[in-house]
Image: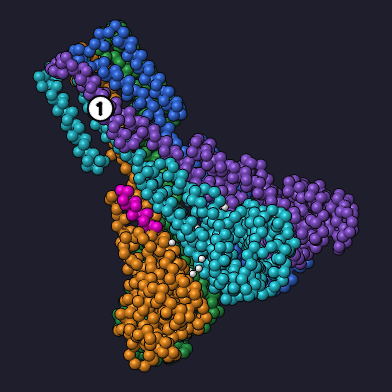
Chain colours: A cyan, B orange, C purple, D green, E blue
Amino acid sequence: MIRIVYFPKIGVPQFNLPFTSLRSALADPEGLVWVDMVESDADEINRVLVNQFHFHPLAVEDCQSDGYQTPKLDDYGDYLFLIIQSVIGEGSFEDEPTRELNIFLGKNYLVSSSLKKITAVEIFRKRLEKDERLYQNGSDFLCHALLDRVVDDFIPHLDQLEEEIDYLEEAVLSNPDPKTLERILRLKRYTMTLRRVIAPQREVINRLCRDDFPMIDPYSRMYFRDIYDHLVRIYDLLDGIRDMTTSALEVYLNATSLRLNEVMKALTIVSTIFLPLSFVAGVYGMNFHYMPELEWRWGYPMVWLIFILIVAGMLTFFRKRRWF
Amino acid sequence: MIRIVYFPKIGVPQFNLPFTSLRSALADPEGLVWVDMVESDADEINRVLVNQFHFHPLAVEDCQSDGYQTPKLDDYGDYLFLIIQSVIGEGSFEDEPTRELNIFLGKNYLVSSSLKKITAVEIFRKRLEKDERLYQNGSDFLCHALLDRVVDDFIPHLDQLEEEIDYLEEAVLSNPDPKTLERILRLKRYTMTLRRVIAPQREVINRLCRDDFPMIDPYSRMYFRDIYDHLVRIYDLLDGIRDMTTSALEVYLNATSLRLNEVMKALTIVSTIFLPLSFVAGVYGMNFHYMPELEWRWGYPMVWLIFILIVAGMLTFFRKRRWF
Amino acid sequence: MIRIVYFPKIGVPQFNLPFTSLRSALADPEGLVWVDMVESDADEINRVLVNQFHFHPLAVEDCQSDGYQTPKLDDYGDYLFLIIQSVIGEGSFEDEPTRELNIFLGKNYLVSSSLKKITAVEIFRKRLEKDERLYQNGSDFLCHALLDRVVDDFIPHLDQLEEEIDYLEEAVLSNPDPKTLERILRLKRYTMTLRRVIAPQREVINRLCRDDFPMIDPYSRMYFRDIYDHLVRIYDLLDGIRDMTTSALEVYLNATSLRLNEVMKALTIVSTIFLPLSFVAGVYGMNFHYMPELEWRWGYPMVWLIFILIVAGMLTFFRKRRWF
Amino acid sequence: MIRIVYFPKIGVPQFNLPFTSLRSALADPEGLVWVDMVESDADEINRVLVNQFHFHPLAVEDCQSDGYQTPKLDDYGDYLFLIIQSVIGEGSFEDEPTRELNIFLGKNYLVSSSLKKITAVEIFRKRLEKDERLYQNGSDFLCHALLDRVVDDFIPHLDQLEEEIDYLEEAVLSNPDPKTLERILRLKRYTMTLRRVIAPQREVINRLCRDDFPMIDPYSRMYFRDIYDHLVRIYDLLDGIRDMTTSALEVYLNATSLRLNEVMKALTIVSTIFLPLSFVAGVYGMNFHYMPELEWRWGYPMVWLIFILIVAGMLTFFRKRRWF
Amino acid sequence: MIRIVYFPKIGVPQFNLPFTSLRSALADPEGLVWVDMVESDADEINRVLVNQFHFHPLAVEDCQSDGYQTPKLDDYGDYLFLIIQSVIGEGSFEDEPTRELNIFLGKNYLVSSSLKKITAVEIFRKRLEKDERLYQNGSDFLCHALLDRVVDDFIPHLDQLEEEIDYLEEAVLSNPDPKTLERILRLKRYTMTLRRVIAPQREVINRLCRDDFPMIDPYSRMYFRDIYDHLVRIYDLLDGIRDMTTSALEVYLNATSLRLNEVMKALTIVSTIFLPLSFVAGVYGMNFHYMPELEWRWGYPMVWLIFILIVAGMLTFFRKRRWF
Ligand SMILES: [Mg+2]
Ligand SMILES: [Mg+2]
Ligand SMILES: [Mg+2]
Ligand SMILES: [Mg+2]
Ligand SMILES: [Mg+2]
Ligand SMILES: [Mg+2]
Ligand SMILES: [Mg+2]
Ligand SMILES: [Mg+2]
Ligand SMILES: [Mg+2]
Ligand SMILES: [Mg+2]
Ligand SMILES: [Mg+2]
Ligand SMILES: [Mg+2]
Ligand SMILES: [Mg+2]
Ligand SMILES: [Mg+2]
Ligand SMILES: [Mg+2]
Ligand SMILES: [Mg+2]
Ligand SMILES: [Mg+2]
Ligand SMILES: [Mg+2]
Ligand SMILES: [Mg+2]
Ligand SMILES: [Mg+2]
Ligand SMILES: [Mg+2]
Ligand SMILES: [Mg+2]
Ligand SMILES: [Mg+2]
Ligand SMILES: [Mg+2]
Ligand SMILES: [Mg+2]
Ligand SMILES: [Mg+2]
Ligand SMILES: [Mg+2]
Ligand SMILES: [Mg+2]
Ligand SMILES: [Mg+2]
Ligand SMILES: [Mg+2]
Ligand SMILES: [Mg+2]
């Protein structure tokens, strides 16, 4: 799907510009064009990226390949090519956390391309219809607005991560079963993967606000710097979540070992009480012909007294050791 | 709340300058103005930061957003914009450890802004009334004095952290229960979070004493360097506390496993003594018709002798193994 | 084995050029020559690398030594010498993961040399016969095409690693025996070794796309940058796999300790039920002459009642502690 | 206490120069003055550092503050200000390992100041009386000689650390009790703290031999480089000690778990031998009217044979499993 | 011991040149002199290093001090001073792994000095007699040949380390006793120490091939680069060995815990079988007057049936849980 928006210098923007008008729109140096390609097949890619814009074959190849690609910024002179990762944010923390967005930034155009629909782009599209400031400051500001949208999308997803870790921190105390362990480890891995996405993404944005590119004017740099700040914060939050999962793991493993302690205590208490008792009973179950105690009148009550003394002694001992 | 202080070149400072006089005070290039905004709503922000000072919208936005922001320094040419974190220091080590302070530093003014009251700023305000050196050396020195106050506030809080770790180091030996574990982990996490705040804060101050800004004269740089030293020391102390919590955790986990050892020893001692005794008693409880020992005159005393020999042998064995 | 391919500026390439024509082919500054040496003995090495190309003795020595060598790039002025590691990818994860490929890159020639056959080179050779773009852009582009092939070969091998870790993540839950542990540790070590290969390889390619070499024209740099991207991604994937093996190890160790818990619970339940029962039975097995209960009509049924009450009490206690 | 030494260009040095002659001594550009202040109160500090030398208030403040300060080097143009940490070396490894020494280095003077007496300074003072080379090469060489003395003091203290770790490495095998654990952890923490002192101290000395300061001539730089080498070696040794404490900790924790294994084996051996024996004895203690074995002539000896067979079988089984 | 070799520009080298001819040999700018000092006392050091060569006192001091010194390179203008560590390689992995070699490299001379004999130097000396290429390319090439020999000596020693870790990897599975643990930890520490030696040594060689020194001509730099490659490889191998020892440690600790599991299973199986059996036997050992079962004709066989059913049930239960 190809969606073209044309913002003339004066007058209202034309959403859904037909493809046939693209060439003339691009010829207007004062205007601004946004071409958004979603789920485009090889034919569409060819018509737009190759035949119309003559982008470098390697950049076009990156737009088409569907494996994970690390965020990066390639400077092709007339245009910049960016690979950005946008968060999916479904909350299961199991699959790939992000989806790839490819961006070409030229003097008077912005081309975005993704193999699957990206929520942040759709929302950005709706905003464009309402907020004219977004497209009245050139292609670099338009690009900033899109990237800002993409990065802002990470924040609510991080809130989900924090909810999960909050839940897990309670679960390791109240319910430390193997399922909890699995969720802890899954969250940890997911957080590590996200960090590996955010770190290079942060560096890409850092270059946009630090390096000197002809299509980015100094005025816009501060805005990219603002996005950079957000990515620094996101990275910090991920660091914090990783620390918390590590702590949760430690509590979990300790809970397992505390339970073993408890089980062993129960066993030890019962054994150390009843083994002596049984021994005493066994002594007076012997069949020796000459056992004076057996004939005593108070022999049997006396044995009960011994039983009671043993139990009392043991319980005192355990109390002193604070076993219960 | 907007609080304005005006320090004319000659004469006494005017605390609580009315907002209407702000413009003329700022017009005095030899004077110095401090505008302090606390819990300001959008309207106050607008009147002061936007309409009066014309600060960059991104900096204004940062003053208004209430999530955690990493300390940073933005150079807007005419003025510097700083995000600084001031410690709260309540002693529970559970929540966010710091509160954000936003600072604008211009040639002849200092603007500070925070969403909530910050103790360090209030104390600084009181000091201003007594110590005229603080405002007689220009806006950079005034800014230094404020930052110095903010950073000095961390030291007593670190003392609290050290008291906590001192307590915990004893508790893991005398009372290693799950509550102690929780406090150890909480302290560790809190310390890690503080480190993530201090590290970039240190870099912000480092830039103030290293880079060349028109509103900071060489004379003042040494003073920022002094604050930098304090932050280096704070970071070192946090490093030490983190090491100590890790040690405390190791002692705790070892205490758990030592307890298990103790319980198991008790069980083993009792079992290995009474199982053989019970067996011997069981043998002479058998009902075979032809058991010569049962008819012996000294059979019963002999069995007691066997009992005593077994117990003595076992105790000797345990002693040799140093089980008690 | 020496295999020479000559690509004249105009006309079809000559595969299997005889060695005697090599000198005249190299004399053609517009043509391009690829010399591929596999399992060459000292004599072949001498004839080609020393007598024909006069390569530096240290580079020639590196081609002949058969220990592991870290990927590197040496600039000899007229030519570049590269040591590259190509993945073997057999799937046992036990031996050295890679095989060394030595490359000399000159203005109008490419010399590759390896002690053993390398799959990637053979595939590259076949592609050359079909795709003329590969050799129509000079020796640098030809070299890029070969390196691209070598690096692409890592991807399916990483898929094998991911399959192994997927298997192991299930195995640690369903079947945590020592064999699983061994496979986890082997995979971890293999991954670490691969990382140590990939990291310097990535830096070699980085230099090819960043530094200024006379035999690499700016047009080709972007292509080396594409290979660099792949190596960055491979390194990221290896990072992910390492994290996952660490997690699997943690689950494995926890499974061992959970099993111990289960065994101990079984022991404790049985002991705490039967030790009291045996004691009661032992009491009424005593031979005291005066034991009134023994003569009661309902003594024996009463004892069974006691047995049942003890068992019921114990089971209730265990249920409450959720031991089964 | 203020101690002043004046080294005129020609003639003998004047130890214990009175304070009143300090000004004229400093006025001699060819002479060299060393002012050493120990345990000085505010008044002495004022007279010397402020009124006589006019040092920067921040440097003076650092001399007076008594918290731990990270080693640093401040360049005030006319003089350098150094904070150096000198080892105390008492051998308990519990308190702060170092004491602060403040040094001002000018063209023709050296001022040292410390809140408490420092052994290295006292020894240095005594050496001065004997070795005239130390003061015949200018203030930079004098400063080098003092720093060399301070750094050399660390070496015997590190030997103490190595003795401690040697002792602990044996103790974890022969006597792994909680006291040993405490000493291991204390040593580890102490070593970490020392590393945090040495690392910045090394960088301070590195700057003295690398940067260009007017009061340090090229000839002296090599001598600072020599001190730098010692600090590198000290840091390496601390690294080694840290590794060894970590190993000792691992052996300790393993010893705990080996002990548990041993205890459990004893329990298991006794239980698995005597539980079957007691069962057999229990069988022939039953009171059934019709139990043929009880009436057999060789019933009782036969039971003893069974007992012996069971014990022999169990011991064989344990031997095969190598349990003892 | 002082051994002097003089290589005149033309003619055969003079091994064992007498000390008295050293001055004239050094005066020949076209010739090359190698002075090798082993176990030299203060007098020899003085005669050669101080009086003859006038080397810097700090360098001479380094030659004489016998503690461990980190590899380094000092540039004294006319000559370079290197501290290099040569491996001892005895195979016990217990003591210091290396011995110090001091090298002075001048325009037309090479001076080597060590407190104890170094194998690599002796072998190098023998090679010199056979291979004239080594001394026909100037002092830098001679120095390279010596360093190459020293670095090559590490490789067979690393093979010993790999044999040790191969042995240990088997031992942790077949024979995980405390002695194995000790060897693992010793190997780990030894490897860490070696890494701390190799890392700075690598940097020293890196400076020789990267920096611009008058006594090293560009032609020789490639040869130092070759040594650098070897050190990179050695460092990689050490990294791998460290990873493998860590894995071996993990297997060892797991083996300990698996053994505990096995012991506990044996105990649990025996207890859970015999405790119920003994209880049943105990029931029919009670002396109640009214116990109908005792008088039944088939009472006793019935009890045996109960015994067999209990054992069968337990074994089935254990089988199902896969306890054996
Ligand atoms: Mg793609
Ligand atoms: Mg944003
Ligand atoms: Mg960064
Ligand atoms: Mg912002
Ligand atoms: Mg924003
Ligand atoms: Mg945080
Ligand atoms: Mg804010
Ligand atoms: Mg301060
Ligand atoms: Mg820093
Ligand atoms: Mg200070
Ligand atoms: Mg530090
Ligand atoms: Mg400290
Ligand atoms: Mg090779
Ligand atoms: Mg590729
Ligand atoms: Mg690509
Ligand atoms: Mg490609
Ligand atoms: Mg990377
Ligand atoms: Mg990944
Ligand atoms: Mg001080
Ligand atoms: Mg020294
Ligand atoms: Mg030295
Ligand atoms: Mg010295
Ligand atoms: Mg270092
Ligand atoms: Mg060392
Ligand atoms: Mg030495
Ligand atoms: Mg070599
Ligand atoms: Mg390096
Ligand atoms: Mg080589
Ligand atoms: Mg070689
Ligand atoms: Mg490495
Ligand atoms: Mg390797």
Instruction: Indicate the quadrant where residue D219 lies.
Output: bottom right
Instruction: State left or right for residue A100 relative to residue D40.
Output: right
Q: Give the range drawn in magenta.
A: B176-189
Instruction: State left or right for residue C253 relative to residue A222.
Output: left
Instruction: Indicate the quadrant where residue C284 lies.
Output: top left
Q: Mark 1 lies on which chain?
A: C
**Residue at 65% across / 61% down in the picture?**
A3
Instruction: State left or right for residue B11 relative to residue C72.
Output: left
Q: Is residue B100 above or below residue A270?
A: below
Q: What residue type is labelled 1?
A: Ile
**SS at badge 1:** helix
Q: Name the residue under label 1.
A: C310
Hey, which residue is sitting farthest bottom in the picture? B10
The quadrant the N terminus of chain B occupies is bottom left
Overall secondary structure of the magenta section:
helix
Give the percent coordinates (x, y) of residue A123.
55, 61
Q: Residues within 10 Å of mark 1 (few under 14, many from 20)?
A: some
**Residue at 24% across / 43% down in the picture?**
A322
Residue B292 falls inside the magenta stretch: no
Q: Determine if residue C99 is in view.
A: yes
Give the percent coordinates (x, y) of residue E202.
60, 61
Residue closest to the eye, B63 or C265 = B63
Give the percent coordinates (x, y) of residue C42.
79, 50
**Residue at 47% across / 43% down in the picture?**
C251
Residue closest to the eye, E33 or E235 = E235
Residue B179 falls inside the magenta stretch: yes
The quadrant the C terminus of chain B occupies is top left
